[in-house]
Image (cartoon, helix red, strand yellow):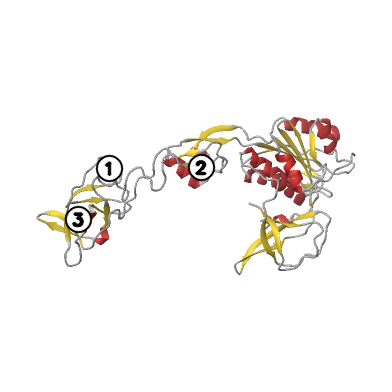
Amino acid sequence: MRHRHTVEVTTARKMILEDVQSGLKERMSLKDAIGRYVAQPIVATHDVPSFHRSPYDGYAIVAEDTDAANDKNPVYLPEVDIIYAGDTMKRTLKRGHSMRVMTGAAIPDGANAVIPLELVTCSLQDGKPTMQVKRKIKMGTNISYAGEDIQSGSLLIEKGKKIDAGMMAICATFGYDQVTVYRKPKVGILCSGSELLPIEAPLQHGMIRNSNAYMLMGQIQRVGAEPVLFPVVQDDREETYHRIANAIEEVDILITTGGASIGDRDYIPAILNDLEYTCLFDKVAMRPGSVTTAAKKGCKYIFALSGNPSACYVGFELFVQPLIMACYGIKQQAELALQSAILSHDIVQKHPFTRFIRAKTYIADATCMIQTIGLDKSGSLSSLLEANALLVVERGSPTLLAGDKLNYIALT
């Protein structure tokens, strides 16, 4: 086993993110685009509103006709027409008259104000419907002007944004029935270990079910990529070599779990060398998951993560996830995106490496608090149940006390 050189987390992330190219693009129907990442900017093709319109049911008027209106001197404006939402015929309103308008209807030419229905009295005058105004109405009252919401040519959605329901509404408003998005990267999962059972198999002494595969599937899908699950590979060097060589041909990124440490059957680091992959790093100054390995060949990446569940989880979040996001054209930083919270309890353990402890944030008395969850061991499963954050404890930190302000990484 060759000597492993330990690198810091930020250094490892920088190595991964160097020379990453955005992924391939594809056109797809808007109705299927939820959760996909926009690959080219989307701009407004017209004003919104595209015409002056009424936000209320009421009457379109010429505001100057109401200059003298008050309780003792009402102004009577005969109704000469009705405009419904969706009417395409253009009308012109003359002084001394009114037009009934419905919510969303176009404002007639000549009108410069709308008075809501509940603020007027309607009656018949000389056999004609007439509305009565008892207050002065200012010019522009209750008119939604063309372009006041969005102007033609405005940037609506930047490249790299994840399409949500609101963005779908925006795209539909401007007639984008097809959108250009980044193709989902295919991320392979190849778990190694003779002790691993299929999840449907009865539990046997000395064996465990393959939980890492399903955990990784969830993490991959959460960031919008496509997981490809390969059958478990036994602890056999030749079989492992061929399985990795074949799997990487089918995917953009391959994640292996187990077999990456320094044990007698930890073959993967040597196999990556045999496959002529350039090792980016093979040891990181962190716990859990210090033996996390990353390698690259051309545009293909292989991540050899720990077989311990919590270490595997952390390895994906710190290293695989930013690579996937970079494939969507989203610029990633080597530095961690940290937030801060108040520790709810003491932490007395010290460690020579920075620790990423599964934790839970919550609000108490308008303060963001954080507490660790479950066992702080790389093989712990219980800590994954409620974790929504990774508490960052810098190496060599003294005993941490309740009330200390600490950094964490949010898990979304």
Indicate which disc, 1 or 3, sits on the residue closer to the N terminus: 3
Asked whether disc 3 touches disc 2, contact meaning CB atoms under 8 Å apart, the reply is no
Q: Is residue 321 above or below residue 398?
A: above
Q: CA distance from mark 1 to mark 3?
A: 25 Å
* Residue type, numbered disc 2: Ile
Q: CA distance from mark 3 to mark 2?
A: 43 Å
Secondary structure under badge 1? Answer: loop
Q: Name the outermost residue toward the bottom.
A: 365
Q: Quadrant of the N terminus?
A: top right
Q: CA distance from mark 2 to mark 1?
A: 31 Å
* Residue type, numbered disc 3: Asp
**Which of 202 and 339 lies nearest the eye of the viewer?**
339
The x and y percentages for residue 241 are 81, 32
The x and y percentages for residue 338 are 67, 54
At x 69%, y 34%, the residue is 252
Mark 1 — residue? 87
**Which of 347 and 148 lies nearest the eye of the viewer?**
148
Indicate which disc, 3 or 2, sits on the residue closer to the N terminus: 3
Mark 2 — residue? 157
The x and y percentages for residue 279 are 80, 37
Secondary structure under badge 2? Answer: strand
The x and y percentages for residue 274 are 84, 31
The label shown at residue 31 is none
Q: Quadrant of residue 142?
A: bottom left
Does the rendering let one see residue 67?
yes
Does the rendering let one see residue 198?
no
Mark 3 — residue? 65
Q: Is residue 260 above or below residue 392?
A: above
At x 23%, y 62%, the residue is 135
Q: Name the outermost residue toward the left.
A: 126
Q: Is residue 29 left or right of residue 193?
A: left
